[in-house]
Image: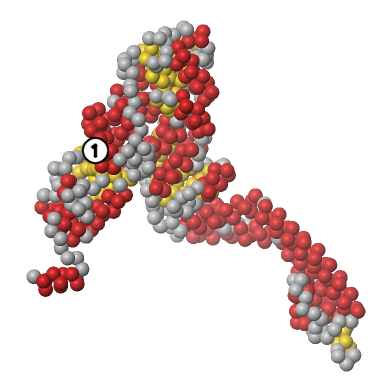
Amino acid sequence: MANPLLAFWSTLLGRDEDRPARRRGRQAAAASAAQASATVFLVMRRMRAPLIVLIVIFAVSVLGLTLIPGQDAAGRPWRMGFFDAFYVMTYTASTIGFGEIPYPFTYNQRMWVTIVIYLTVIGWAYAIGSLLALLQDRAFRHALALQHFRRKVNRLREPFLILAGYGRTGELLGHSFDALGRRFVVLDANEDRIDDLELGSYHADVPALVADARDPGLLCVAGLTHPSCEAVLALTDDEETNLAVVMAAALLRPDLPVIARTTSRVLVERMQAFGDPTVVNPFDCFGDHLRIALKAPASYQLMTWLESGPGAELPVRGRPPREGAWVVCGYGRLGRQITADLRVEGTQVTPIDPRASADEDADVVVGDGSDPRVLSRVDLHSAVGFVAGTDSDTTNLSLVAAARRANPGLFVAARQNRSASAALFAAMEIDALLVPTDVIAREVYAQLSTPLLWRFLREMPAKGEAWAAALIDRLTSLCGTQLHTMWKVHLTPKEAPALSGWLASGQLCLADLMRSPNNRDEPLPAVALIVLRGEGCTLAPDGDFVLVTGDEVLFAGWSAARRALDTTLLVDAVREYVLTGRRVPESWIWRKLTRAAT
Protein backbone atom coordinates (compact mmCIF):
# COMPACT_ATOMS: atom_id res chain seq x y z
CA MET A 1 0.00 0.00 0.00
CA ALA A 2 1.35 3.46 -0.86
CA ASN A 3 2.52 5.84 1.85
CA PRO A 4 -0.40 8.25 2.46
CA LEU A 5 1.98 11.10 3.30
CA LEU A 6 3.83 10.69 0.01
CA ALA A 7 0.48 10.46 -1.77
CA PHE A 8 -0.53 13.75 -0.17
CA TRP A 9 2.65 15.44 -1.39
CA SER A 10 2.22 13.96 -4.85
CA THR A 11 -1.34 15.27 -5.01
CA LEU A 12 -0.24 18.67 -3.80
CA LEU A 13 2.63 18.86 -6.26
CA GLY A 14 0.48 17.59 -9.08
CA ARG A 15 -1.51 20.81 -9.03
CA ASP A 16 1.59 22.81 -9.95
CA GLU A 17 1.03 24.56 -13.28
CA ASP A 18 4.62 25.75 -13.68
CA ARG A 19 6.97 24.64 -16.38
CA PRO A 20 7.84 20.91 -16.56
CA ALA A 21 11.39 21.43 -15.23
CA ARG A 22 10.18 23.17 -12.10
CA ARG A 23 7.39 20.64 -11.68
CA ARG A 24 9.94 17.84 -11.85
CA GLY A 25 12.02 19.66 -9.27
CA ARG A 26 9.14 19.86 -6.85
CA GLN A 27 8.34 16.22 -7.41
CA ALA A 28 11.95 15.35 -6.65
CA ALA A 29 11.57 17.19 -3.35
CA ALA A 30 8.47 15.21 -2.34
CA ALA A 31 10.33 12.37 -0.64
CA SER A 32 12.60 14.75 1.30
CA ALA A 33 9.68 16.96 2.25
CA ALA A 34 7.79 13.91 3.47
CA GLN A 35 10.81 12.91 5.51
CA ALA A 36 10.95 16.41 6.98
CA SER A 37 7.29 16.11 7.99
CA ALA A 38 7.63 12.61 9.46
CA THR A 39 9.01 13.67 12.85
CA VAL A 40 5.73 13.15 14.66
CA PHE A 41 5.33 9.69 13.09
CA LEU A 42 8.85 8.77 14.15
CA VAL A 43 8.10 9.89 17.72
CA MET A 44 4.89 7.87 17.81
CA ARG A 45 6.62 4.78 16.41
CA ARG A 46 9.58 4.89 18.83
CA MET A 47 7.40 5.80 21.85
CA ARG A 48 4.64 3.30 21.05
CA ALA A 49 5.73 0.63 23.52
CA PRO A 50 6.41 3.05 26.45
CA LEU A 51 3.06 4.76 25.89
CA ILE A 52 1.23 1.43 25.78
CA VAL A 53 2.92 0.39 29.03
CA LEU A 54 1.88 3.64 30.74
CA ILE A 55 -1.69 3.35 29.46
CA VAL A 56 -1.98 -0.26 30.62
CA ILE A 57 -0.58 0.57 34.07
CA PHE A 58 -2.96 3.52 34.38
CA ALA A 59 -5.99 1.51 33.22
CA VAL A 60 -5.27 -1.42 35.54
CA SER A 61 -4.70 0.98 38.43
CA VAL A 62 -8.01 2.78 37.86
CA LEU A 63 -9.86 -0.53 37.45
CA GLY A 64 -8.37 -1.90 40.70
CA LEU A 65 -9.46 1.15 42.69
CA THR A 66 -13.03 0.76 41.42
CA LEU A 67 -13.15 -2.94 42.31
CA ILE A 68 -11.58 -2.84 45.78
CA PRO A 69 -14.28 -1.83 48.30
CA GLY A 70 -13.75 1.00 50.79
CA GLN A 71 -15.67 2.55 53.66
CA ASP A 72 -17.53 5.84 53.97
CA ALA A 73 -17.47 8.09 57.05
CA ALA A 74 -20.17 5.95 58.77
CA GLY A 75 -18.26 2.71 58.20
CA ARG A 76 -20.61 1.46 55.49
CA PRO A 77 -19.14 -0.31 52.42
CA TRP A 78 -18.47 2.07 49.53
CA ARG A 79 -17.00 1.63 46.06
CA MET A 80 -15.12 4.35 44.27
CA GLY A 81 -16.49 5.45 40.89
CA PHE A 82 -14.42 5.57 37.70
CA PHE A 83 -14.11 9.34 37.79
CA ASP A 84 -12.88 9.37 41.40
CA ALA A 85 -10.46 6.51 40.65
CA PHE A 86 -9.20 8.31 37.55
CA TYR A 87 -8.72 11.50 39.55
CA VAL A 88 -6.82 9.72 42.36
CA MET A 89 -4.55 7.92 39.89
CA THR A 90 -3.90 11.14 37.99
CA TYR A 91 -2.35 12.95 40.94
CA THR A 92 -0.76 9.77 42.27
CA ALA A 93 0.93 8.78 39.01
CA SER A 94 2.13 12.35 38.47
CA THR A 95 3.71 12.37 42.00
CA ILE A 96 1.56 15.28 43.16
CA GLY A 97 -0.40 13.36 45.86
CA PHE A 98 -3.32 15.44 47.18
CA GLY A 99 -4.48 12.74 49.67
CA GLU A 100 -7.06 9.99 50.08
CA ILE A 101 -10.47 11.12 48.77
CA PRO A 102 -13.36 11.20 49.19
CA TYR A 103 -12.86 8.98 52.28
CA PRO A 104 -9.73 7.56 53.93
CA PHE A 105 -8.59 4.37 52.19
CA THR A 106 -8.87 0.92 53.74
CA TYR A 107 -5.79 -1.28 54.11
CA ASN A 108 -6.71 -3.14 50.91
CA GLN A 109 -6.96 0.11 48.98
CA ARG A 110 -3.65 1.37 50.42
CA MET A 111 -1.94 -1.90 49.51
CA TRP A 112 -3.20 -1.56 45.94
CA VAL A 113 -2.11 2.10 45.71
CA THR A 114 1.34 1.09 47.04
CA ILE A 115 1.69 -1.48 44.26
CA VAL A 116 0.43 1.05 41.72
CA ILE A 117 2.99 3.64 42.81
CA TYR A 118 5.89 1.26 42.13
CA LEU A 119 4.37 0.25 38.82
CA THR A 120 3.99 3.87 37.70
CA VAL A 121 7.57 4.67 38.73
CA ILE A 122 8.78 1.78 36.59
CA GLY A 123 6.51 2.88 33.74
CA TRP A 124 7.66 6.49 33.89
CA ALA A 125 11.33 5.44 34.08
CA TYR A 126 10.84 3.28 30.98
CA ALA A 127 9.04 6.06 29.10
CA ILE A 128 11.53 8.80 30.05
CA GLY A 129 14.48 6.55 29.18
CA SER A 130 12.94 5.79 25.80
CA LEU A 131 12.32 9.50 25.19
CA LEU A 132 15.92 10.42 26.05
CA ALA A 133 17.17 7.67 23.76
CA LEU A 134 14.93 9.03 21.01
CA LEU A 135 16.33 12.53 21.44
CA GLN A 136 19.83 11.11 20.93
CA ASP A 137 18.78 9.04 17.93
CA ARG A 138 20.47 10.20 14.73
CA ALA A 139 17.44 9.56 12.54
CA PHE A 140 15.16 11.59 14.84
CA ARG A 141 17.62 14.47 15.08
CA HIS A 142 18.05 14.50 11.31
CA ALA A 143 14.27 14.47 10.73
CA LEU A 144 13.82 17.27 13.26
CA ALA A 145 16.62 19.35 11.72
CA LEU A 146 15.23 18.75 8.22
CA GLN A 147 11.75 19.85 9.28
CA HIS A 148 13.12 22.99 10.94
CA PHE A 149 15.33 23.73 7.92
CA ARG A 150 12.45 23.34 5.47
CA ARG A 151 10.27 25.76 7.43
CA LYS A 152 13.03 28.39 7.51
CA VAL A 153 13.64 28.10 3.76
CA ASN A 154 9.92 28.29 2.95
CA ARG A 155 9.63 31.50 4.97
CA LEU A 156 12.30 33.26 2.89
CA ARG A 157 10.81 36.02 0.78
CA GLU A 158 13.91 37.96 -0.30
CA PRO A 159 16.32 36.60 -2.97
CA PHE A 160 18.81 34.06 -1.65
CA LEU A 161 21.69 31.85 -2.77
CA ILE A 162 22.26 28.13 -2.17
CA LEU A 163 25.78 27.31 -0.95
CA ALA A 164 26.57 23.62 -1.36
CA GLY A 165 29.66 23.32 0.81
CA TYR A 166 30.70 25.50 3.74
CA GLY A 167 34.45 25.12 3.83
CA ARG A 168 36.87 28.03 3.82
CA THR A 169 35.48 29.28 0.51
CA GLY A 170 31.88 29.12 1.70
CA GLU A 171 32.76 30.88 4.93
CA LEU A 172 34.48 33.77 3.12
CA LEU A 173 31.57 34.14 0.72
CA GLY A 174 29.04 33.88 3.52
CA HIS A 175 30.53 36.79 5.43
CA SER A 176 30.94 38.87 2.25
CA PHE A 177 27.34 38.33 1.14
CA ASP A 178 26.10 38.92 4.68
CA ALA A 179 27.89 42.30 4.70
CA LEU A 180 26.00 43.14 1.50
CA GLY A 181 22.67 42.11 3.05
CA ARG A 182 22.33 39.07 0.78
CA ARG A 183 20.63 35.94 2.17
CA PHE A 184 21.91 32.41 1.59
CA VAL A 185 21.16 28.79 2.49
CA VAL A 186 23.87 26.24 3.29
CA LEU A 187 24.17 22.47 2.75
CA ASP A 188 27.26 20.62 3.95
CA ALA A 189 27.94 16.99 4.81
CA ASN A 190 30.33 17.96 7.62
CA GLU A 191 28.49 18.49 10.92
CA ASP A 192 31.38 20.48 12.42
CA ARG A 193 31.16 23.06 9.64
CA ILE A 194 27.44 23.55 10.22
CA ASP A 195 28.15 24.00 13.94
CA ASP A 196 30.75 26.63 13.10
CA LEU A 197 28.22 28.41 10.88
CA GLU A 198 25.62 28.50 13.64
CA LEU A 199 28.20 30.06 15.95
CA GLY A 200 29.22 32.62 13.33
CA SER A 201 28.38 36.29 13.68
CA TYR A 202 25.92 36.85 10.84
CA HIS A 203 23.44 39.70 10.71
CA ALA A 204 20.62 37.50 9.39
CA ASP A 205 19.58 33.97 10.26
CA VAL A 206 21.25 31.43 7.95
CA PRO A 207 19.27 28.22 7.27
CA ALA A 208 21.79 25.35 7.31
CA LEU A 209 21.53 21.58 7.16
CA VAL A 210 23.94 18.68 7.51
CA ALA A 211 23.17 16.91 4.24
CA ASP A 212 24.66 15.39 1.11
CA ALA A 213 24.31 17.95 -1.67
CA ARG A 214 24.24 15.14 -4.26
CA ASP A 215 20.64 14.41 -3.27
CA PRO A 216 18.37 16.39 -5.65
CA GLY A 217 15.50 16.16 -3.17
CA LEU A 218 17.57 17.88 -0.47
CA LEU A 219 18.62 20.55 -2.96
CA CYS A 220 14.93 21.22 -3.65
CA VAL A 221 14.19 21.39 0.08
CA ALA A 222 17.07 23.89 0.30
CA GLY A 223 15.22 26.12 -2.16
CA LEU A 224 16.28 25.01 -5.64
CA THR A 225 12.68 25.34 -6.85
CA HIS A 226 11.91 28.31 -4.59
CA PRO A 227 10.92 31.38 -6.64
CA SER A 228 13.32 33.57 -4.63
CA CYS A 229 16.39 31.41 -5.31
CA GLU A 230 18.74 33.39 -7.57
CA ALA A 231 21.84 31.15 -7.89
CA VAL A 232 23.43 27.86 -6.81
CA LEU A 233 27.08 27.63 -5.72
CA ALA A 234 28.74 24.19 -5.78
CA LEU A 235 31.75 24.76 -3.51
CA THR A 236 32.36 21.39 -1.85
CA ASP A 237 35.76 19.71 -1.62
CA ASP A 238 34.43 16.75 -3.61
CA GLU A 239 34.37 17.59 -7.31
CA GLU A 240 31.98 14.74 -8.09
CA THR A 241 29.53 16.30 -5.64
CA ASN A 242 29.93 19.63 -7.42
CA LEU A 243 29.16 17.89 -10.72
CA ALA A 244 26.04 16.33 -9.19
CA VAL A 245 24.86 19.77 -8.00
CA VAL A 246 25.40 21.22 -11.49
CA MET A 247 23.44 18.35 -13.03
CA ALA A 248 20.54 18.70 -10.60
CA ALA A 249 20.31 22.47 -11.09
CA ALA A 250 20.51 22.17 -14.89
CA LEU A 251 17.78 19.53 -15.06
CA LEU A 252 15.42 20.90 -12.41
CA ARG A 253 15.99 24.67 -12.78
CA PRO A 254 17.68 25.29 -16.15
CA ASP A 255 17.06 29.05 -15.84
CA LEU A 256 19.08 29.32 -12.62
CA PRO A 257 22.73 30.54 -12.68
CA VAL A 258 25.16 27.92 -11.36
CA ILE A 259 28.77 28.44 -10.28
CA ALA A 260 30.95 25.42 -9.49
CA ARG A 261 34.55 24.86 -8.44
CA THR A 262 36.80 22.25 -9.98
CA THR A 263 40.44 21.73 -10.91
CA SER A 264 39.85 18.96 -13.46
CA ARG A 265 39.47 19.78 -17.13
CA VAL A 266 37.55 16.52 -17.62
CA LEU A 267 34.96 17.59 -15.05
CA VAL A 268 34.80 21.03 -16.64
CA GLU A 269 33.71 19.40 -19.90
CA ARG A 270 31.20 17.19 -18.08
CA MET A 271 29.75 20.20 -16.28
CA GLN A 272 29.48 22.21 -19.49
CA ALA A 273 27.41 19.39 -20.98
CA PHE A 274 24.63 20.53 -18.61
CA GLY A 275 23.60 24.01 -19.66
CA ASP A 276 26.09 26.83 -19.27
CA PRO A 277 27.43 26.79 -15.69
CA THR A 278 30.25 29.10 -14.64
CA VAL A 279 33.20 26.91 -13.67
CA VAL A 280 35.90 28.41 -11.45
CA ASN A 281 39.29 26.70 -11.63
CA PRO A 282 41.63 28.28 -9.04
CA PHE A 283 44.70 27.15 -10.97
CA ASP A 284 43.52 28.83 -14.16
CA CYS A 285 42.60 31.96 -12.22
CA PHE A 286 45.97 32.08 -10.47
CA GLY A 287 47.81 31.68 -13.77
CA ASP A 288 45.86 34.58 -15.26
CA HIS A 289 46.37 36.67 -12.13
CA LEU A 290 50.08 35.93 -12.08
CA ARG A 291 50.44 37.15 -15.65
CA ILE A 292 48.62 40.38 -14.74
CA ALA A 293 50.72 40.79 -11.58
CA LEU A 294 53.92 40.48 -13.61
CA LYS A 295 52.85 42.78 -16.44
CA ALA A 296 50.61 45.30 -14.63
CA PRO A 297 51.07 45.36 -10.83
CA ALA A 298 48.76 48.35 -10.33
CA SER A 299 45.94 46.64 -12.26
CA TYR A 300 46.47 43.49 -10.21
CA GLN A 301 46.45 45.51 -7.00
CA LEU A 302 43.14 47.18 -7.93
CA MET A 303 41.56 43.89 -9.08
CA THR A 304 42.55 42.06 -5.89
CA TRP A 305 41.28 44.91 -3.72
CA LEU A 306 37.85 45.10 -5.34
CA GLU A 307 37.43 41.31 -5.39
CA SER A 308 38.16 41.02 -1.66
CA GLY A 309 34.83 42.53 -0.62
CA PRO A 310 33.77 45.07 2.03
CA GLY A 311 36.33 45.82 4.72
CA ALA A 312 39.35 44.77 2.66
CA GLU A 313 42.55 46.76 3.04
CA LEU A 314 44.43 47.95 -0.05
CA PRO A 315 47.04 45.24 -0.76
CA VAL A 316 50.66 46.14 -1.29
CA ARG A 317 51.57 46.73 -4.91
CA GLY A 318 53.97 44.06 -6.08
CA ARG A 319 57.33 44.61 -7.72
CA PRO A 320 57.45 42.35 -10.78
CA PRO A 321 60.82 40.91 -11.73
CA ARG A 322 62.72 41.75 -14.85
CA GLU A 323 62.39 39.49 -17.86
CA GLY A 324 64.15 36.17 -17.49
CA ALA A 325 63.81 32.48 -16.84
CA TRP A 326 61.45 30.84 -14.30
CA VAL A 327 61.62 27.59 -12.35
CA VAL A 328 58.39 25.76 -11.48
CA CYS A 329 58.51 23.04 -8.79
CA GLY A 330 55.52 20.70 -8.96
CA TYR A 331 54.38 19.75 -12.44
CA GLY A 332 50.86 18.83 -11.48
CA ARG A 333 47.73 20.68 -12.55
CA LEU A 334 48.92 24.01 -11.13
CA GLY A 335 52.47 23.64 -12.45
CA ARG A 336 51.30 22.79 -15.95
CA GLN A 337 48.89 25.73 -15.99
CA ILE A 338 51.49 28.26 -14.82
CA THR A 339 54.09 26.85 -17.19
CA ALA A 340 51.68 27.20 -20.11
CA ASP A 341 50.69 30.75 -19.11
CA LEU A 342 54.31 31.89 -18.76
CA ARG A 343 55.33 30.32 -22.05
CA VAL A 344 52.50 32.11 -23.81
CA GLU A 345 54.24 35.34 -22.75
CA GLY A 346 57.50 34.06 -24.26
CA THR A 347 59.11 33.24 -20.89
CA GLN A 348 61.56 30.37 -20.54
CA VAL A 349 60.29 27.90 -17.89
CA THR A 350 61.98 24.87 -16.36
CA PRO A 351 59.61 22.51 -14.49
CA ILE A 352 60.83 20.27 -11.64
CA ASP A 353 58.81 17.31 -10.34
CA PRO A 354 59.74 13.91 -8.92
CA ARG A 355 56.72 12.23 -10.53
CA ALA A 356 57.03 13.82 -13.96
CA SER A 357 58.58 12.20 -16.96
CA ALA A 358 60.87 13.79 -19.49
CA ASP A 359 58.57 12.55 -22.23
CA GLU A 360 55.92 15.05 -21.07
CA ASP A 361 58.17 18.07 -21.50
CA ALA A 362 61.67 18.18 -22.93
CA ASP A 363 62.70 20.78 -20.33
CA VAL A 364 61.33 18.96 -17.27
CA VAL A 365 63.79 18.07 -14.51
CA VAL A 366 62.82 14.86 -12.71
CA GLY A 367 63.62 15.04 -9.00
CA ASP A 368 62.84 16.59 -5.63
CA GLY A 369 63.12 20.35 -5.90
CA SER A 370 64.06 20.70 -2.23
CA ASP A 371 67.16 18.56 -2.82
CA PRO A 372 70.20 20.83 -3.38
CA ARG A 373 71.56 18.34 -5.94
CA VAL A 374 68.39 18.72 -8.02
CA LEU A 375 68.39 22.52 -7.72
CA SER A 376 72.00 22.53 -8.86
CA ARG A 377 70.81 21.07 -12.18
CA VAL A 378 68.85 24.27 -12.93
CA ASP A 379 70.31 27.73 -13.16
CA LEU A 380 68.62 29.45 -10.21
CA HIS A 381 71.22 32.20 -10.10
CA SER A 382 70.17 33.60 -13.47
CA ALA A 383 66.43 32.89 -12.94
CA VAL A 384 64.07 35.72 -12.00
CA GLY A 385 61.06 33.75 -10.75
CA PHE A 386 60.36 30.60 -8.76
CA VAL A 387 57.06 28.76 -8.20
CA ALA A 388 56.49 26.24 -5.38
CA GLY A 389 53.26 24.60 -6.49
CA THR A 390 53.04 21.14 -4.92
CA ASP A 391 50.04 19.91 -2.92
CA SER A 392 52.05 19.86 0.35
CA ASP A 393 52.52 23.03 2.37
CA THR A 394 55.61 21.63 4.10
CA THR A 395 57.22 20.87 0.76
CA ASN A 396 56.35 24.28 -0.66
CA LEU A 397 57.84 26.08 2.34
CA SER A 398 61.04 24.06 2.11
CA LEU A 399 61.23 24.74 -1.64
CA VAL A 400 60.90 28.47 -1.08
CA ALA A 401 63.61 28.41 1.60
CA ALA A 402 65.96 26.43 -0.65
CA ALA A 403 65.35 28.68 -3.66
CA ARG A 404 65.94 31.88 -1.70
CA ARG A 405 69.09 30.42 -0.23
CA ALA A 406 70.37 29.88 -3.76
CA ASN A 407 69.14 33.26 -5.09
CA PRO A 408 67.76 35.81 -2.58
CA GLY A 409 66.51 38.07 -5.38
CA LEU A 410 63.98 35.62 -6.81
CA PHE A 411 60.35 36.59 -7.30
CA VAL A 412 58.61 33.76 -5.42
CA ALA A 413 55.10 32.41 -5.98
CA ALA A 414 53.80 29.61 -3.76
CA ARG A 415 50.68 27.53 -3.20
CA GLN A 416 49.09 27.35 0.26
CA ASN A 417 46.87 24.29 0.62
CA ARG A 418 45.75 24.51 4.27
CA SER A 419 44.44 27.57 6.09
CA ALA A 420 46.37 26.49 9.20
CA SER A 421 49.61 27.22 7.31
CA ALA A 422 48.71 30.87 6.70
CA ALA A 423 50.99 32.19 9.46
CA LEU A 424 53.99 30.28 8.07
CA PHE A 425 53.50 31.57 4.53
CA ALA A 426 53.01 35.10 5.86
CA ALA A 427 56.32 34.84 7.72
CA MET A 428 58.04 33.74 4.48
CA GLU A 429 56.84 36.98 2.76
CA ILE A 430 55.78 35.28 -0.48
CA ASP A 431 55.55 37.68 -3.45
CA ALA A 432 52.53 35.93 -5.02
CA LEU A 433 50.56 33.49 -2.85
CA LEU A 434 47.95 31.10 -4.21
CA VAL A 435 45.28 30.11 -1.70
CA PRO A 436 42.76 28.16 -3.85
CA THR A 437 39.86 28.75 -1.45
CA ASP A 438 40.48 32.52 -1.42
CA VAL A 439 40.82 32.68 -5.20
CA ILE A 440 37.50 30.90 -5.67
CA ALA A 441 35.79 33.11 -3.09
CA ARG A 442 36.99 36.29 -4.82
CA GLU A 443 35.95 35.07 -8.26
CA VAL A 444 32.47 34.04 -7.10
CA TYR A 445 32.02 37.26 -5.12
CA ALA A 446 32.96 39.35 -8.15
CA GLN A 447 30.37 37.55 -10.27
CA LEU A 448 27.48 37.56 -7.81
CA SER A 449 27.90 40.73 -5.76
CA THR A 450 26.82 42.73 -8.81
CA PRO A 451 27.19 42.03 -12.53
CA LEU A 452 28.67 45.51 -12.94
CA LEU A 453 31.70 44.60 -10.81
CA TRP A 454 32.32 41.51 -12.94
CA ARG A 455 32.07 43.64 -16.10
CA PHE A 456 34.46 46.19 -14.60
CA LEU A 457 37.06 43.56 -13.71
CA ARG A 458 36.88 42.04 -17.20
CA GLU A 459 37.30 45.40 -18.94
CA MET A 460 39.83 46.94 -16.57
CA PRO A 461 43.12 45.28 -17.70
CA ALA A 462 42.77 46.80 -21.17
CA LYS A 463 42.83 50.34 -19.72
CA GLY A 464 46.53 50.14 -18.87
CA GLU A 465 48.78 50.45 -15.86
CA ALA A 466 48.74 54.25 -15.57
CA TRP A 467 44.94 54.32 -15.60
CA ALA A 468 44.73 51.72 -12.81
CA ALA A 469 47.27 53.59 -10.68
CA ALA A 470 45.34 56.85 -11.12
CA LEU A 471 42.06 55.19 -10.12
CA ILE A 472 43.66 53.75 -6.99
CA ASP A 473 44.85 57.24 -6.08
CA ARG A 474 41.32 58.61 -6.54
CA LEU A 475 39.82 55.89 -4.36
CA THR A 476 42.38 56.23 -1.56
CA SER A 477 42.21 60.04 -1.53
CA LEU A 478 38.41 60.05 -1.17
CA CYS A 479 37.74 56.82 0.76
CA GLY A 480 41.01 55.78 2.39
CA THR A 481 42.82 52.46 2.04
CA GLN A 482 39.86 50.37 3.24
CA LEU A 483 37.15 49.23 0.84
CA HIS A 484 33.96 50.07 2.73
CA THR A 485 31.15 49.09 0.38
CA MET A 486 30.09 48.91 -3.26
CA TRP A 487 26.60 49.47 -4.57
CA LYS A 488 24.68 49.90 -7.81
CA VAL A 489 22.36 52.76 -8.75
CA HIS A 490 19.89 52.43 -11.60
CA LEU A 491 18.82 55.86 -12.85
CA THR A 492 15.17 55.18 -13.60
CA PRO A 493 12.01 57.12 -12.59
CA LYS A 494 11.27 54.36 -10.09
CA GLU A 495 14.66 54.22 -8.34
CA ALA A 496 15.66 57.86 -8.81
CA PRO A 497 12.38 59.83 -8.98
CA ALA A 498 13.94 63.12 -7.88
CA LEU A 499 16.33 63.14 -10.88
CA SER A 500 13.78 62.48 -13.64
CA GLY A 501 13.67 66.06 -14.89
CA TRP A 502 17.43 66.60 -14.77
CA LEU A 503 18.11 63.32 -16.55
CA ALA A 504 15.64 64.19 -19.29
CA SER A 505 17.30 67.58 -19.82
CA GLY A 506 20.67 65.97 -20.55
CA GLN A 507 22.47 68.34 -18.16
CA LEU A 508 23.15 66.09 -15.18
CA CYS A 509 26.90 65.62 -14.77
CA LEU A 510 28.40 62.99 -12.53
CA ALA A 511 30.31 65.59 -10.50
CA ASP A 512 27.05 67.43 -9.68
CA LEU A 513 25.40 64.22 -8.53
CA MET A 514 28.34 63.37 -6.27
CA ARG A 515 28.02 66.51 -4.11
CA SER A 516 27.27 66.18 -0.40
CA PRO A 517 23.67 67.01 0.67
CA ASN A 518 25.09 68.71 3.77
CA ASN A 519 27.60 70.88 1.94
CA ARG A 520 27.49 70.80 -1.83
CA ASP A 521 31.02 72.18 -2.04
CA GLU A 522 32.31 68.89 -0.67
CA PRO A 523 32.33 65.72 -2.79
CA LEU A 524 30.89 62.49 -1.46
CA PRO A 525 33.52 59.95 -0.37
CA ALA A 526 32.76 57.62 -3.28
CA VAL A 527 33.95 56.93 -6.82
CA ALA A 528 31.93 55.76 -9.82
CA LEU A 529 33.71 52.65 -11.11
CA ILE A 530 31.62 51.95 -14.19
CA VAL A 531 28.58 53.34 -16.01
CA LEU A 532 26.65 50.83 -18.08
CA ARG A 533 24.56 52.27 -20.90
CA GLY A 534 22.89 49.70 -23.09
CA GLU A 535 25.57 47.29 -24.30
CA GLY A 536 28.39 49.79 -23.84
CA CYS A 537 30.15 50.86 -20.68
CA THR A 538 32.45 53.61 -19.44
CA LEU A 539 35.03 52.79 -16.76
CA ALA A 540 35.80 55.32 -14.01
CA PRO A 541 34.17 58.30 -15.80
CA ASP A 542 35.30 61.78 -14.85
CA GLY A 543 33.10 64.48 -13.35
CA ASP A 544 32.05 65.90 -16.74
CA PHE A 545 30.38 62.64 -17.77
CA VAL A 546 26.70 63.32 -18.55
CA LEU A 547 24.23 60.81 -17.11
CA VAL A 548 20.99 59.84 -18.86
CA THR A 549 17.89 57.90 -17.92
CA GLY A 550 18.53 54.17 -17.74
CA ASP A 551 22.21 54.35 -16.80
CA GLU A 552 23.47 51.82 -14.29
CA VAL A 553 26.32 53.08 -12.11
CA LEU A 554 28.55 51.07 -9.77
CA PHE A 555 29.97 53.08 -6.87
CA ALA A 556 32.68 52.26 -4.33
CA GLY A 557 32.98 54.30 -1.15
CA TRP A 558 31.72 54.87 2.36
CA SER A 559 28.36 53.67 3.61
CA ALA A 560 27.56 57.27 4.56
CA ALA A 561 28.05 58.27 0.93
CA ARG A 562 25.56 55.63 -0.13
CA ARG A 563 22.93 56.95 2.28
CA ALA A 564 23.56 60.54 1.19
CA LEU A 565 23.29 59.62 -2.50
CA ASP A 566 20.03 57.74 -1.87
CA THR A 567 18.64 60.91 -0.30
CA THR A 568 19.57 62.90 -3.39
CA LEU A 569 17.89 60.34 -5.65
CA LEU A 570 14.64 60.30 -3.69
CA VAL A 571 14.06 63.73 -2.12
CA ASP A 572 13.29 66.71 -4.38
CA ALA A 573 14.45 69.32 -1.89
CA VAL A 574 17.83 67.62 -1.40
CA ARG A 575 18.21 67.21 -5.17
CA GLU A 576 17.53 70.91 -5.66
CA TYR A 577 20.19 71.92 -3.16
CA VAL A 578 22.80 69.48 -4.45
CA LEU A 579 22.40 70.48 -8.10
CA THR A 580 21.66 74.23 -7.82
CA GLY A 581 22.63 75.29 -4.32
CA ARG A 582 19.11 76.60 -3.67
CA ARG A 583 17.42 75.41 -0.48
CA VAL A 584 13.75 74.58 -0.97
CA PRO A 585 11.34 74.14 1.97
CA GLU A 586 10.30 70.53 2.11
CA SER A 587 7.47 70.31 4.64
CA TRP A 588 4.05 71.96 4.28
CA ILE A 589 4.63 74.17 7.36
CA TRP A 590 7.96 75.51 6.12
CA ARG A 591 6.50 76.23 2.69
CA LYS A 592 3.70 78.24 4.32
CA LEU A 593 6.14 80.13 6.54
CA THR A 594 8.40 80.87 3.57
CA ARG A 595 5.52 82.26 1.53
CA ALA A 596 4.39 84.40 4.46
CA ALA A 597 7.90 85.80 4.90
CA THR A 598 8.12 86.75 1.24
Residue lying at the far bottom of the rendered structure: 74
Q: Is residue 437 left or right of residue 532?
A: right
Q: Would you identify the image quadrant in which residue 63 lies?
A: bottom right
Q: Would you identify the image quadrant in which residue 363 lies?
A: top left
**Residue 542, position in %: x, y?**
17, 40
Q: Nearer the viewer, residue 409 or 167?
A: 409
Asked if 438 appears above or below 230 in the picture, the reply is above
Q: Is residue 404 visible?
A: yes
Q: Is residue 513 left or right of residue 481?
A: left
| Residue at point 24%, 38% (across, down) | 474
Residue identified by numbered label 1: 474
**Screen quadrant of the N terminus:** bottom right
**Screen quadrant of the C terminus:** bottom left
| Residue at point 17%, 49% (across, down) | 521
Residue lying at the far left of the rendered structure: 598
Q: Nearer the viewer, residue 463 or 276?
A: 463
**Residue 290, position in %: x, y?**
36, 25
| Residue at point 23%, 58% (across, down) | 570
